[in-house]
């Protein structure tokens, strides 16, 4: 482990000296905080964190190493991982390597010695911020200036960068490529009689959503974000899933158009970015949250049952509750921390979506019932 | 036909059913946090002022919202009665919250039933506001010496079918029921409480107030009042209603007063159990139900004390298997009958008790099976007197003894033995009893004997000479030899060599010789810094190491050495003074003179004695400030339990060395990153918590939750660790414990792979005997839950006889040591040898006189794949059947479709 001095600079001029535990490096992005105590490997590989510097409020990271199983996509998605204290000596029978080795192998910066709670409190007051972290440029002034030159998250189509290039099956817990010459039509399904055929849009999908759908009895074909409505109709799936993904939903115009054309065609279930895209397709508006919701302890109230679920979340944008037009949309879930929208359904069409992550990973399984609800909805249509 | 025991019990219980009853609560009034409890009992009566010092030191364990004390074995003279009256009469003390309530109380509950031998108010200070910090006026207390009137007792016995009961015990029951009625009328049933009974036993009294425990003694003028046994309590209720003295400890049984540190998890269950026996709490605290339960088992069921302890703190797990078969049989019955009514921890009881039937006084400490509260026991054989002490903190014991010794030369400031009880164990039963009974000399003198739950005596060497402190110094007859010893101390190439020399001479010395030697060292230290450093090193070695003290008591030898060390430390010039030299002194009075070190000033000597135990003005903050100013070397002495020593230096505080003397406090070395701390004596609780890096050496034992959540550091402990050491520790802590631990050693340990840089604990399971000889303990680790649910790191345990069994583990496995393991731990054992004189070859690897292979002597406990996780794949872990079944399925779809418009 090479320990090097590093500096984190925020766009508003604050700097935080820290140490890199992954050797030299420099990277930039938006700084966001996550309040999970464990589950760092899932966080690192969650495509919704694409391009972000993620900091953890829990002070000790790395103590159980990394393994081949707890991944949510095929690579580390965050730009950098900022922790209070890194623990190089890991303990877990599943562990195959240390966190530092894992980050270094994928050329992702890891820094420690940062007062992550002070950073978090600052972000909570001042809002999510662009930042640069470097072991090469330790000059606060120049680093702050550079933080101000990086593009903001709003207005960027990040999903296009993380979506799969080609469609694939999700089978037995892993992706299986669909041969390039196989046409996407109704013959694509191999278990139509026994399983629910789900076309899953990948805007940066987490593997555990796919594991969850499979576990709920679905056969899944994951399709690229830009797949048009005609292709979906040709596939004739039992249901359509709209995945999570990074950043701002508004620039992903093509997906919003596609979804609008699929409204009412088959049951639609959206998670995270999926609900935002659905909201926009239904005529609503989205906005950037001050500092987002990221963690495994976000309280959500299910307004239909009155039950509170402790949920896993990761989003920086949200659907504006008041923007949803007409009487067709019913709010089903709200966040109890700030009363923002966490779920809605359509009163006439088989459409429902949640802002939080029922698939957890990491996090509690309180909301796992939604995957079964999706399959039951498909049974009815 | 005479009634058998069971019929009498039933009649007693039936009699209680007739008592008036108010609202029945199974909710306690207040939750309590970590209270401070302390108690001592002596073969001779001692003044109430001695319960002060420990109470003052434990202010941070209370919030002044309730304090109380109890005394047993009282002075008849001070109470103005004859000894016969004190022995035979009930000492009824009624707290009058409403000063006008007395006539009503006497008319309703006293005059009709009691022959009053003597009655009157307890004398108090004229004005409670004379006591600093006392804001609520303590209740007026009226004291009565009473017996039950014959006609009243006859009626009671006849009405309740108790004629076959010992009439004296029936009288006890009458008194107890009368107290209940009085409390019900004047306390429990009222919104505005008027009066309640503080105590009603024989030769025992309780007083309590809204305030701190020592204010009780001050207000009720008990500072000079003498009694054999005293207990005190600082209450720290964490929530609850308005505070009143009724809720403070101690609580009365019959002839027992009980104080308690803890917070039951099952108040409701215990209250329900009592209710089934027609016993109804009136003050709604854990402590009250504890003493009611004790009274039920003791007076109604007439259990011997061993069975009472078993009913309250059952023997469990591996320890139960270790009990002899006949005991197992009895305990099984006790447990099946009482386990549902036994208090579930955390709790630690101290009970002061008079047994008028067998004519002894007793101090009892009982810890819960899980040992969730700190507890220290100590025993001292003084000059013809004995004293036993039980406290939450070791420093409180030392404070009591120091206070006592200053007044009465028959006591010493250092106990002969300090130890912890192992809750619910087969070894000591988690309880110790100090019994003061007639010495059998025919002169009325008394003796103190300490036994554990099973009646086995705790022994200390009794033949050795006690050092009676006198201000005047006699002249040694061995001036020549002493001078040559001083020369040897100066000249010796290394300290172990000098120690060897000293050990050869000491058996021929008396206290005068030793004192002269120490005074010479003090003189030497005055000469120059080099000699001072040498003198400190020499005396420190004599303080730290274990060796035979011959015909002299070890505690007395230590006292002389420590007094000299303190004198040398005190000699150092203050920071204000002119003068040169590398030593500079600071204390509470000169604390504002702190400045950066100048020129050759190197060592800051701090007397922590008068500093508050924690907070803005505490010594730990001063030390951190001194470090910021550039000081790197510290001698810290005079401790009376001040906390957080060494904390707050920040990251990478390398090159700092602290030598800590006397009764250091909780959290020492917690969170340190780099410094080296050496504790020249026993440590207290929570040492080295979340420690990151650095070195900690303890020349003694350490207390509860040692190194909780530590992430690194190199640590050497000469003696034992109490309960729960190294729980949740991660990374690379490397620890040698030469003694043993109570339980839960390295639970949830996550210290990587030790041979690849991770952490480990070496547990040697050895102890020095009274002659300074290192011997293997019967079992290196007698408890359960060794390395429980650990996922990394290892324990290397010296266990040549293979006493530790898989049964004691919970998720780990025992394997043989590899050469890599031995190469890893050997340097640590070598350092251990340097520090404590525990030889790798001659002590650790030698078994029954023969040197054995390391692999025959040591065993390794390491982590295994945890079944609970390994059984299922990651996917099924995420969607495992366990939680799915638990989850009530919420049919979202149904709601979606039925609500469709």
Image (spheres, rainbow, N blue to C red):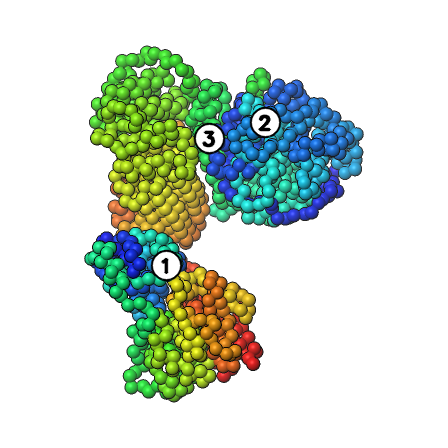
Q: Residue at x 36, y 71 (%)?
A: A248
User: Distance of mark 1 from mark 2, alpha carbons?
Assistant: 56 Å
Image vertical order of residue A263 relative to residue A68, above or below: below
User: Distance of mark 1 from mark 3, alpha carbons?
Assistant: 53 Å
Image vertical order of residue B398 relative to residue A181, above or below: above
Q: Residue furthest left?
A: A136
**Nearest to the observer: residue B672 or residue B591:** B591
Q: Residue at x 34, y 11 (%)?
A: B475
CB within 8 Å, label 2 to label 3: no
For label 3, the residue is B397
**Does label 3 lie on the same chain as label 2?**
yes
**Nearest to the observer: residue B402 or residue B346:** B402
Residue B387 percent across, percent down from the top left: 50, 26
Q: Chain of mark 2?
A: B
Q: Which mark is residue A126?
A: 1
Residue A62 percent across, percent down from the top left: 32, 56
Residue A100 percent across, percent down from the top left: 27, 58
Image vertical order of residue B290 relative to residue A338, above or below: above
Q: Is residue A100 left or right of residue A310?
A: left
Residue B304, image quadrant: top right
């Amino acid at each position: 482990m090479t320990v090097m001095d590093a500096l984190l600079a925020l766009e508003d001029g604050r700097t935080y000296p820290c140490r890199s535990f992954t050797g030299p490096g420099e990277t930039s992005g938006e700084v966001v905080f996550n309040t999970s105590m464990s589950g760092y490997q899932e966080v690192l590989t969650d495509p919704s964190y694409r391009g972000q510097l993620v900091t953890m409020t829990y002070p000790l990271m790395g103590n159980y190493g990394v393994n081949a199983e707890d991944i949510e996509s095929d690579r580390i998605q965050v730009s950098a991982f900022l922790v209070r204290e890194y623990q190089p000596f890991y303990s877990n029978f599943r562990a195959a390597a240390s966190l530092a080795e894992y980050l270094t192998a994928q050329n992702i910066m890891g820094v420690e010695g940062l007062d992550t709670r002070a950073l978090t409190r600052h972000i909570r007051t001042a809002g999510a911020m662009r930042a640069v972290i470097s072991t090469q440029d330790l000059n606060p002034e120049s680093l702050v200036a550079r933080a101000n030159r990086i593009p903001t998250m709003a207005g960027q189509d990040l999903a296009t960068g993380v979506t799969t290039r080609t469609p694939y099956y999700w089978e037995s817990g892993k992706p299986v490529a669909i041969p390039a010459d196989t046409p996407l039509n109704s013959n694509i399904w191999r278990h139509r009689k026994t399983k629910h055929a789900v076309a899953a849009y990948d805007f940066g999908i987490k593997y555990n959503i796919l594991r969850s759908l499979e576990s709920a009895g679905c056969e899944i074909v994951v399709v690229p974000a830009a797949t048009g409505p005609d292709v979906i109709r040709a596939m004739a799936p039992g249901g359509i899933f709209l995945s999570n993904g990074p950043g701002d939903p508004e620039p992903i115009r093509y997906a919003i158009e596609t979804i609008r054309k699929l409204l009412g065609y088959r049951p639609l279930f959206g998670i995270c970015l999926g609900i935002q895209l659905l909201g926009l397709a239904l005529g609503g508006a989205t906005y950037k949250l001050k500092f987002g919701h990221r963690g495994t302890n976000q309280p959500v109230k299910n307004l239909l049952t009155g039950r509170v679920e402790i949920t896993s979340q990761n989003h920086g944008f949200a659907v504006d509750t008041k923007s949803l037009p007409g009487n067709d949309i019913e709010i089903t879930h709200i966040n109890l921390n700030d009363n923002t929208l966490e779920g809605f359904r359509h009163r006439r069409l088989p459409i429902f979506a949640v802002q939080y992550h029922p698939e957890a990973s990491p996090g509690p399984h309180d909301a796992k019932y939604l995957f079964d609800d999706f399959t039951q909805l498909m049974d009815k249509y | 036909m005479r009634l058998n025991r069971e019929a009498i019990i039933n009649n007693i219980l039936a009699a209680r059913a007739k008592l008036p009853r108010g609202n029945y609560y199974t909710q306690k009034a207040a939750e309590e946090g970590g209270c401070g409890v302390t108690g001592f009992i002596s073969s001779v009566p001692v003044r109430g002022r001695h319960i002060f010092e420990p109470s003052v030191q434990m202010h941070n364990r209370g919030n002044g919202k309730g304090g109380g004390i109890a005394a047993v074995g009282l002075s008849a003279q001070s109470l103005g009665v004859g000894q016969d009256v004190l022995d035979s009469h009930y000492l009824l003390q009624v707290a009058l919250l409403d000063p006008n309530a007395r006539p009503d109380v006497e008319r309703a509950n006293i005059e009709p039933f009691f022959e009053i031998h003597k009655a009157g108010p307890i004398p108090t200070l004229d004005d409670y506001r004379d006591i600093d910090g006392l804001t609520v006026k303590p209740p007026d207390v009226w004291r009565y010496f009473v017996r039950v009137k014959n006609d009243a007792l006859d009626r009671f016995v006849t009405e309740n079918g108790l004629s076959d009961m010992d009439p004296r015990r029936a009288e006890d029951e009458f008194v107890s029921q009368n107290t209940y009625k009085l409390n019900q009328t004047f306390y429990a049933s009222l919104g505005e409480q008027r009066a309640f009974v503080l105590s009603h036993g024989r030769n025992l009294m309780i007083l309590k107030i809204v305030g701190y425990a020592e204010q009780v003694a001050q207000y009720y003028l008990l500072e000079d009042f003498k009694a054999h046994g005293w207990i005190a309590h600082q209450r720290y209720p964490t929530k609850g209603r308005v505070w009143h003295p009724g809720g403070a400890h101690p609580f009365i049984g019959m002839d027992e007063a009980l104080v308690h540190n803890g917070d039951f998890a099952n108040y409701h269950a215990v209250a329900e159990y009592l209710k089934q026996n027609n016993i109804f709490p009136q003050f709604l605290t854990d402590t009250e139900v504890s003493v009611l339960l004790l009274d039920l088992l003791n007076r109604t069921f007439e259990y011997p004390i061993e069975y009472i302890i078993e009913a309250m703190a059952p023997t469990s797990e591996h320890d139960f298997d270790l009990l002899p078969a006949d005991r197992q049989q009895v305990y099984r019955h006790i447990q099946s009958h009482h386990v549902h009514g036994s208090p579930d921890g955390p709790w630690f009881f101290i009970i002061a008790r008079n047994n008028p039937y067998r004519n002894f006084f007793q101090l009892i400490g009982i810890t819960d099976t899980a040992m969730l509260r700190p507890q220290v026991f100590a025993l001292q054989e003084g000059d013809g007197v004995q004293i036993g002490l039980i406290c939450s903190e070791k420093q409180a014991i030392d404070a009591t003894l120091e206070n006592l010794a200053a007044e009465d030369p028959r006591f010493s400031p250092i106990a002969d033995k300090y130890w912890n009880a192992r809750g619910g164990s087969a070894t000591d039963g988690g309880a110790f009893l100090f019994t003061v009974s007639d010495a059998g000399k025919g002169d009325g003198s008394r003796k103190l004997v300490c036994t554990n739950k099973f009646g086995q005596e705790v022994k200390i060497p009794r033949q050795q000479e006690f050092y009676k402190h006198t201000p005047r110094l006699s002249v040694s007859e061995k001036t020549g030899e002493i001078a040559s010893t001083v020369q040897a101390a100066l000249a010796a190439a290394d300290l172990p060599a000098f120690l060897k020399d000293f050990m050869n001479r000491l058996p021929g010395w008396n206290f005068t010789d030793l004192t002269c030697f120490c005074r010479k060292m003090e003189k030497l230290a005055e000469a120059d810094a080099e000699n001072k450093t040498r003198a400190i090193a020499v005396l420190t070695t004599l303080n730290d190491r274990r060796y035979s003290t011959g015909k002299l008591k070890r505690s007395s030898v230590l006292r002389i050495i420590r007094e000299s060390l303190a004198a040398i430390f005190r000699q150092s010039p203050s920071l204000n003074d002119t003068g040169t030299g590398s030593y500079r002194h600071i204390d509470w009075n000169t604390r504002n003179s702190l400045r950066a070190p100048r020129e050759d000033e190197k060592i800051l000597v701090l007397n922590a004695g008068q500093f508050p135990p924690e907070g803005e003005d505490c010594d730990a903050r001063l030390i951190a400030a001194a470090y910021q100013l550039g000081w790197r070397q510290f001698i810290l002495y005079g401790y009376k339990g001040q906390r957080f020593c060494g904390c707050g230096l920040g990251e990478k505080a390398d090159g700092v060395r602290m030598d800590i003397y006397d009764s250091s406090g909780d959290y020492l070395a917690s969170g340190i990153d780099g410094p080296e701390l050496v504790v020249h004596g026993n440590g207290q609780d929570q040492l080295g918590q979340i420690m990151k890096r650095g070195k900690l050496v303890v020349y003694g034992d350490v207390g509860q939750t040692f190194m909780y959540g530590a992430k690194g550091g190199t640590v050497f402990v000469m003696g034992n660790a109490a309960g729960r050491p190294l729980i949740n520790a991660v990374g690379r802590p490397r620890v040698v414990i030469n003694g043993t631990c109570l339980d839960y050693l390295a639970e949830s340990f996550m210290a990587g792979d030790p041979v690849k840089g991770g952490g480990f604990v070496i547990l040697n399971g050895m102890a020095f005997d009274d002659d300074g000889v290192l011997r293997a303990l019967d079992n290196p680790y007698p408890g359960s839950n060794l390395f429980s649910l650990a996922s990394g790191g290892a324990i290397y345990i010296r266990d040549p006889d293979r006493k530790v069994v898989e049964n004691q583990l919970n998720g780990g496995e025992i394997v043989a040591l590899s050469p890599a393991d031995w190469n890893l731990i050997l340097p640590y054992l070598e350092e251990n040898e340097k520090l404590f004189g525990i030889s790798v070859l001659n002590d650790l690897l030698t078994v029954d006189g023969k040197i054995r292979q390391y692999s025959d002597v040591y065993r390794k406990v390491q982590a295994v794949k945890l079944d609970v996780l390994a059984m299922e794949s990651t996917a099924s872990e995420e969607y495992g059947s366990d939680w799915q079944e638990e989850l009530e399925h919420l049919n979202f779809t149904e709601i979606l479709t039925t609500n469709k418009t």
